[in-house]
Amino acid sequence: MLLAFLLDADNTLIDNDAAKATIDERIIGSLGDKVRSTFWRIYEETRLERGLVDYPTTLARLHAELRGLSDDVDAIVWELPYERFRYPASLAVIAELRRSGLPVVLSDGDDVYQPMKIARAGITAAVHGHVLVVRHKEEHLDEVAARFPADRYVLVDDKPALLAAVKARWHDRVVTVHVRQGHYAAESPETPPDVSLASIADVPRALADLTWLTGIR
C-alpha cells in the first residue's frame, strides 16, 4: 500500500510565529512604529482580501503608500533566514517518514515568497523537491492526488479546521494529524483530528503502527 505524508510548512515544519515576530522586531527597530503599523495593516488587509498570506503583494502596496521608506522593509522580509526558524526536529522527521512513504510539503500561500521560504528553510531539499503551494488545500485535493498518487494520505497540519475540511472530503482516505504548535494550538473543531500531538517531533512515533495507519488488519 502506497502512503504519502502531506506536511504543512508554517507552524508545522517552520516556526512561522517566531519568524513574524522577528520581522516585526526588525521593522520597528529600523524604521519605527509607524512603518511597522502600516506594514501589518496592509498585510492583514491583503490576507483578508486574497484569503492567504501574500508578502509580495503586501510589499508592493506598502511601496505605493510609503514610497522610499519601504525599501528597508523589503530587505527585512525577503532576506529573513528561515533556516533559523525551522523546528529542530523537522528534517529528522522527514527522513524518518521516508522509510514508510513519500514525504510531501503541502502549503498554502503565494506562489513566490512561500516556495522561497520553504526552500531557504532547507525543507525543499529534504523532501527532494516534492513541494506543492496552493491557495486553499481542501480545494486542491484532486491536484494533490494526481501529482502524488497514493492509497492513503497522512495530513499533518497545525490548523484543526483545515484537517476537518479535508477529512470531510477524503474520509478514510486520509489520516489527519494535528500538531499543536503556533496560534491554532488550542483550536477545537467539531470534527476532531485522528491524531493530536504536541509537536512535529512526535509524528514518527505516533505513526509507527502502520498496520493501524494503512487500515490493514
Image: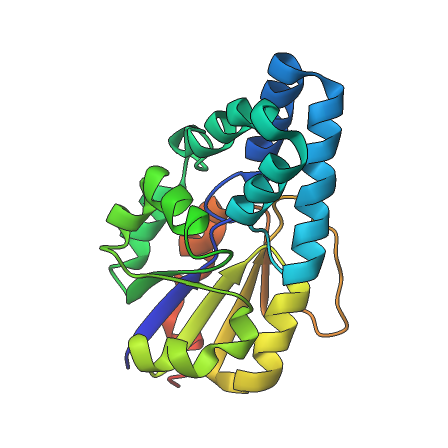
| Quadrant where the image shows the N terminus | bottom left
Residue 155 placement, left or right of 93: right
Residue 78, given in percent of the width and then of the height, sits at 44, 33
Vertical relation: 215 (above or below) 81 = below
The residue shown at (60%, 69%) is 163
Kindly tell me whether residue 185 is visible in this rendering.
Answer: no
The residue shown at (53%, 66%) is 135
Residue 149 placement, left or right of 135: left
Residue 183, given in percent of the width and then of the height, sits at 69, 45
**Pick the front one: 129 or 90:** 129
Residue 160, given in percent of the width and then of the height, sits at 66, 63
The residue shown at (45%, 29%) is 80
Vertical relation: 60 (above or below) 27 = below
**Pick the front one: 13 or 210:** 13
Q: Quadrant of residue 142?
A: bottom left
**Pick the front one: 207 or 133:** 133
Render colour scheme: rainbow
